[in-house]
Image (cartoon, grey):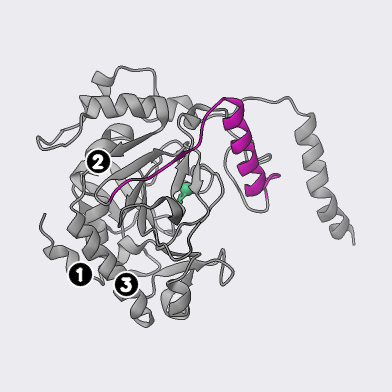
């Protein structure tokens, strides 16, 4: 009985304490910020990077834009036939899902509990609301795409030379996810060491539910989840993801930031800062796919092992273009199961 009362009172008590406490502006810790987010010259940032001679964009220009806006679009950086081959693999994996232990989340089927592909009906994996987790662990081609040199050059400058590609999602349709920033969920030991690449596997159509984002929102004051600071902790945070979303829409409006919609083509990519507010638009035409591969990156300093590695200090890893990709310790048999990518040529 006493425990019941305590449990019932815990939340109102913490909420009251939170509301009475002096409000501070929360932010990432300055000392551990990626160099580009500090008050240093871009010369210093670029000096740490080897820029391949065939880089199809001006790195300095992109970094200037990144600092101001919290995202960049890199045009025509990926071989489009790789993206076709990659999507063929995804389709084949769904068709033969009974052979795959990689997991997926499907809205209103398993929701927040990642479930092996082999335990999810094929029709659901092919439908709206499905996302395949960490497909890069299963596919060599996915690893090659996520570490393509034109992506890596930019990310080395935006995060640090020692990178890890550590989480990915495959979507056939828009996620229709409300506004959010990624750092409260996609966590590492250093919250600011986070960036993501949004890689379309087809040209994006306006009615398919394009990605949307708020330019410059990475510089706005951070949401206070209450009890858990800027990170979201289930069962501990006083505020929930819906309140976070409302806060972001409101503060972006207050600062006069207009929502932008991403209509890019296969071969182009968007890279966003871990602090950029973004989401997936509503699907206007449910026949329309929006095939995409979303990859999250951090630094080896912040993410020294696989996020599911609990008992050891390190994880086995693969290295692609100098980027560390940890093997998933909970699913080693599926690592590199889909091998086609090893023969891809540009
Ligand atoms: O592609 C989308 O609709 C949103 C994806 C996203 O926000 C994420 O993976 O962090
Ligand atoms: Fe996101």
What residue do we see at 22% from left, 38% from top?
153
Disc 3 target residue = 91
Q: Is mark 3 within 8 Å of ligand 1?
A: no
The x and y percentages for residue 28 are 50, 31
Q: Earlier in the sequence, mark 3 or mark 1?
A: 3
Residue 299 visible somewhere in the drawing: no
Q: Residues within 10 Å of mark 2 (few under 14, many from 20)?
A: some
Give the magenta part as a residue range: 236-265
Helix, strand or loop for disc 1: loop
For mark 3, give the secondary structure.
helix
Mark 2–mark 1 distance (CA, rounded to whole Å): 27 Å
Magenta span includes 260: yes
Q: Report if residue 343 lies within the magenta region.
A: no
Residue occupied by mark 2:
75
Which quadrant would residue 308 be assigned to in this image?
bottom left
Position of residue 152 in the picture relative to residue 70 (left or right): left
SS assignment at label 2: loop
User: In this picture, is 66 found above or below 198?
Assistant: above
Where does the image place residue 210, in percent across and percent down from the top left?
44, 50
Looking at this view, is 85 or 302 the one in front?
85
Mark drawn on residue 339: 1
């Amino acid at each position: 009985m006493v425990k019941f009362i305590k449990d019932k009172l815990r939340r109102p008590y913490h909420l009251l304490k939170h509301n009475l406490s002096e409000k501070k502006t929360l932010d990432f810790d300055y000392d551990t910020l990626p160099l580009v987010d500090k008050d240093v010259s871009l010369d210093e940032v670029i000096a740490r990077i080897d820029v391949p001679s065939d880089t199809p964009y001006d790195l300095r220009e992109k970094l200037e834009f990144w600092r101001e806006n919290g995202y960049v679009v890199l045009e025509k950086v990926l071989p489009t036939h790789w993206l076709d081959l990659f999507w063929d693999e995804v389709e084949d994996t769904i068709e033969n899902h009974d052979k795959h232990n990689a997991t997926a989340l499907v809205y209103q089927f398993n929701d927040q509990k990642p479930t092996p592909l082999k335990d999810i009906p094929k029709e659901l994996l092919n439908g709206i609301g499905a996302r395949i987790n960490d497909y890069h662990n299963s596919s060599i081609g996915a690893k090659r795409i996520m570490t393509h040199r034109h992506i890596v050059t930019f990310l080395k400058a935006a995060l640090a030379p020692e990178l890890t590609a550590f989480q990915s999602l495959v979507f056939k349709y828009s996620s229709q996810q409300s506004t959010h920033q990624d750092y409260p969920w996609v966590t590492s030991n250093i919250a600011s060491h986070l960036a993501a690449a949004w890689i379309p596997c087809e040209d994006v159509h306006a009615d398919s539910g394009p990605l949307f984002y708020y330019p410059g929102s990475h510089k706005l004051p951070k949401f206070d989840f209450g009890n858990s600071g800027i990170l979201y902790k289930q069962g501990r945070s006083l505020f929930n993801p819906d309140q976070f979303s409302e806060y972001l829409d409101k503060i972006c409006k207050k600062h006069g930031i207009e929502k932008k919609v991403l209509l890019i083509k296969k071969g182009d990519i968007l890279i966003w800062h871990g602090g950029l507010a973004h989401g997936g638009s509503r699907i206007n035409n449910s026949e329309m796919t929006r095939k995409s591969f979303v990859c999250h990156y951090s630094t080896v300093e912040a993410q020294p092992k696989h996020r599911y590695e609990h008992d050891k200090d390190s994880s086995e890893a693969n290295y692609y273009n100098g980027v560390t990709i940890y093997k998933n310790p909970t699913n080693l048999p599926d690592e590199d199961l889909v091998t086609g990518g090893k023969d891809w040529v540009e």
